Amino acid sequence: MRSDAQSPPAGAARGADFTTFRLGGPVRRLDDCASPAELREALRAAHAEGARWQVIGGGSNLLIADDGWDGVVVRYRRPELELDGAGDEWIVNGACDLDTLALAAVEEGMEGLLFATGIPGTVGGAVAGNAGAFGRQMSDVVLSADLFHPIRGARRVSAAELGFAYRRSALKETRDAVERVRLRLVPGDRARLRAERERILAWRRRRHPDWRVIPTAGSFFRNIEPTSAAGRRQAAGWFLDQAGARNFRVGGAAVYEKHANIIVRASEDCTAEDVVALSRRMAWAVRERFGLVLRREVQFLGDFQEIDGEAPARN
Ligand SMILES: Cc1cc2nc3c(=O)[nH]c(=O)nc-3n(C[C@H](O)[C@H](O)[C@H](O)COP(=O)(O)OP(=O)(O)OC[C@H]3O[C@@H](n4cnc5c(N)ncnc54)[C@H](O)[C@@H]3O)c2cc1C
């Protein structure tokens, strides 16, 4: 295992240190690992000491409770790309940065990962949540994944066994860690791919906060399911906008001015509970106006006072 010079000493790491929301209290330990061997060692150690554990990547879809979480956070992340394979089949370490992989595909003139342009986090995190944009998602390119679980051990599963659905996979239940992923790409025109990438990055800059500067976890709610009263999948942001959520603020948490489905940490004194209270207010506004129930996309770790569907406290 590699100890991260940026991390606080063992036992003192806080959610604020490893999530893009930069919120949340202490965890028992933050273990950094960058290779499958280190990942296995960290998970086996957490299991052997009887601790609760959670694998994370970039922490870009996570909210940690203000009181923290009494468990071991195993952060599987590495700055450099680690790629094997050739031609249209690529094997990538799950700890790698997703956007760096998307850029590499463009530079190799390979098509299939443009949708991932600018999505923060790791390849493993993107597989676990079936990350996507513009109607494309990880399930469109994943062939198989190498998984590890401290009790069940290592196994290779096909894309079908990963149980992909809209912004989810079976990994949410099985809690296997994604060590490596095998992807299928197709040859494309490099100049066109480069131009598309620039267009997507510009689109993101116009609509999303730069998470390196403004703490956020991106879209807070899942888009409206086709099976809901709306009849088809529709952007949660549209309903939130219509319900007037853009002006909402609770404590230090605010709705991002350019995107009604994004919550940002608007001041230093913002708490995770502010975020939750604001999200309840947003969900309630959509429920009152449209009769639709919003489901959150952001993952929670720790204890929150949130009660689904409850009327929000007014600030
Ligand atoms: C500004 C901004 C824009 C965003 N835009 C998009 C978008 O367009 N589309 C989209 O889908 N998402 C988007 N997101 C959300 C987020 O970036 C994605 O969900 C991303 O895939 C999460 O990856 P991560 O590594 O940060 O996961 P984390 O937040 O670290 O973890 C999220 C979940 O994945 C699991 N996980 C992480 N790594 C592994 C692993 N190796 N093995 C098994 N499970 C793992 C965790 O246990 C947890 O349940 C955005 C976020 C931000 C801040």
Image (cartoon, rainbow, N blue to C red):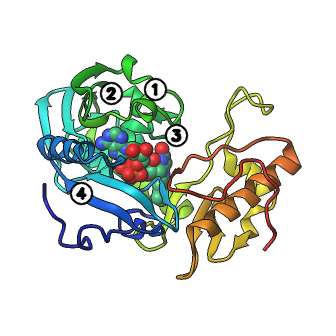
Relative placement, left or right, of 74 versus 42 is right
- Disc nearer the start of the sequence (3/1): 3
Name which residue type carries label 3: Phe
SS of the residue under disc 4: strand
The numbered dot on residue 31 is: 4
* Residue that badge 3 annotates: 134
Above or below for 204 versus 272:
above
Mark 4 neighbour class, 10 Å CA radius: few under 14, some 14 to 19, many 20 or more: many
Question: Sequence-wise, which precedes: disc 3 or disc 2?
Answer: 3
Residue 228: tell me if it is visible. Answer: yes
- Above or below residue 49? Residue 142 is above
Identify the residue shown where x is 64% and y is 55%.
261
Depth check, mark 4 against mark 1: the one in front is 4
- What's the CA distance linking mark 2 and mark 4? 27 Å
Image x and y of residue 254, in percent: 65, 70
| Residue at numbered disc 1 | 164
Residue type beneath disc 1: Phe
Q: Residues within 10 Å of mark 3 (few under 14, many from 20)?
A: few
User: How far apart in space, not on screen, are marks 4 and 3 (Cα)?
Assistant: 34 Å
